[in-house]
Image: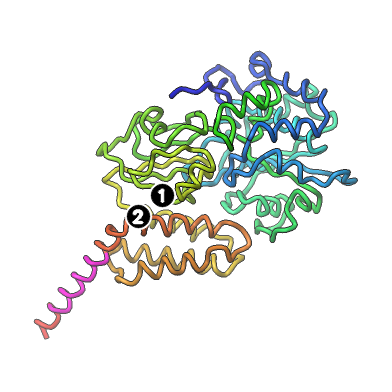
Amino acid sequence: MTTEKILMRNFDRAESHTLRVYRETGGYTALAKAMAMEPAAIVEEVKRSNLRGLGGAGFPTGTKWSFIPKGHPGPVYLVVNADEGEPGTFKDRYLLERDPHALIEGMLITARAIRSALGFVYVRGEYVEPWRRFSTAVREAYEAGYLGRGFDVVVHRGAGAYICGEETGLISSLEGMKGWPKLKPPFPAIKGAFGAPTIVNNVETLCHVPHIIERGAEWFAGLGTKTQGGTRMFSISGRVKRPGVYEASVAVTLRQLIDDYAGGVSGSGRLKAVVPGGSSAAVLRADEIDVPMDVDGLRNAGTMAGSAGVIVMDETVSIPEALMVVARFYAHESCGQCTPCRESTGWIYKMTRRIVAGKGRKEDLDTILDVARRGAGTTICAFYDGAVGPYISYIEKFRSEFEALVEGAGTRAVATRREASAHA
């Protein structure tokens, strides 16, 4: 299955990050077209394109834009989420490094649609080179007159907190406070950054906007599925022969991504499990990968598209160890604001570590599942709900591996007691 490269069309060009190359390949022509359109017409075009958010939630982009209160007298802000902290995901950094002007043009068109005069780009703190490249592109855009004439951009570096990938946590950090998520409602489109209506979009999402305006909503919608248009960039890692970033239609299946794009399974050559949308997505078994990679297709399969971070595991991978690594990450990155998340993530990590060390008990597995389910839906943001996906799916789909470790621990304990009795 082959798909026209849209987001990645310039990646192989020398100096693709420069304004010169971007212009040579048609850059900023969509902006001129958008400036001749009414803001409401831009919103409707994006709605009809079926563009959905590509940072995790998959919410319809044009619909989100339409939530800005009509006739709002004060400022409206545009915030770009370039934090990209989801494990297994590394696509946005390519856009920031190799085609930063695509994001700037997308921001300018979006700003017209929502009537914003100021945008913030929140860049992951560890992304030093992407930050440098994008900051240089911003300076080029100012010098060329694209920025500074009704719309300005502030580039803000984060400090390495995964929770700031959540839109309200990001806004809190942007405002100079601790990166703690906020209760919703009100949603950011009503009351966001500095108390003003704010639209928060992911890098990849906004990079699609110029193409939609230039080539039309019908064209973009036709590239995908009935409920989601276009292509997206998939970060593929783990046990594959050609790990990397690949652009494909959202209608592509997970099997096609692994076999046709990434060259098939490496290592043992036998697929065991796949995480389809970053570490927060529920894991899929080898017999569950004939599923389209759009938002609704993966939701129907009991998982999520998330950030499209595809992590492939062959038969040599220990699922309990994989869960322990994921659990350690969530225990470390919980902001600690909500008790169910703060306490449960740390406790579940300790339990999985104990099981992997061969010291678990038979009842531990059911207790983990019970704690995970009880905590779901009880916190301010979706962080813990995301953690619950792997907690439950790893154990339920590969329970025999966990039980083998627990039974091994039990066998060793019995042997130890017998040895102690013999020496008594």
Q: Amino acid at mark 1?
A: Val
Q: Nearer the viewer, residue 379 or 66?
A: 66
> Which circle marks residue 283 in the picture?
1
Q: Residue at x 27, y 59 (%)?
A: 400
Residue kind at label 2, given as amino acid type: Lys
Residue that protrudes farthest toward the left in the picture: 422
Identify the magenta region. 406-418
Secondary structure under the numbered disc 1 in the rendered image: loop
Look at mark 2 in the image and give the residue it sits on: 397
Q: Is residue 162 visible?
A: yes
Instruction: Determine the CA span between mark 2 and mark 1.
Output: 8 Å
Answer whether labels 2 and 1 touch (C-beta < 8 Å): yes
Instruction: State the residue at coordinates (48%, 38%).
Output: 293
For residue 122: magenta? no
The image quadrant where one finds the C terminus is bottom left
How far from the left and from the top, in percent, is residue 382?
58, 56
* Quadrant of the drawing holding the N terminus: top left
Residue at (31% x, 35% y) in the render: 265
Is residue 131 positioned above or below 397 on the image? above
- Where on the picture, by quarter, is residue 355? bottom left
* Magenta-colored segment: predominant secondary structure: helix
Q: Is residue 223 left or right of residue 111?
A: left
195 shown above or below 237: below
Mark positioned earlier in the residue sequence (2 or 1): 1
Give the SS element for disc 2.
helix
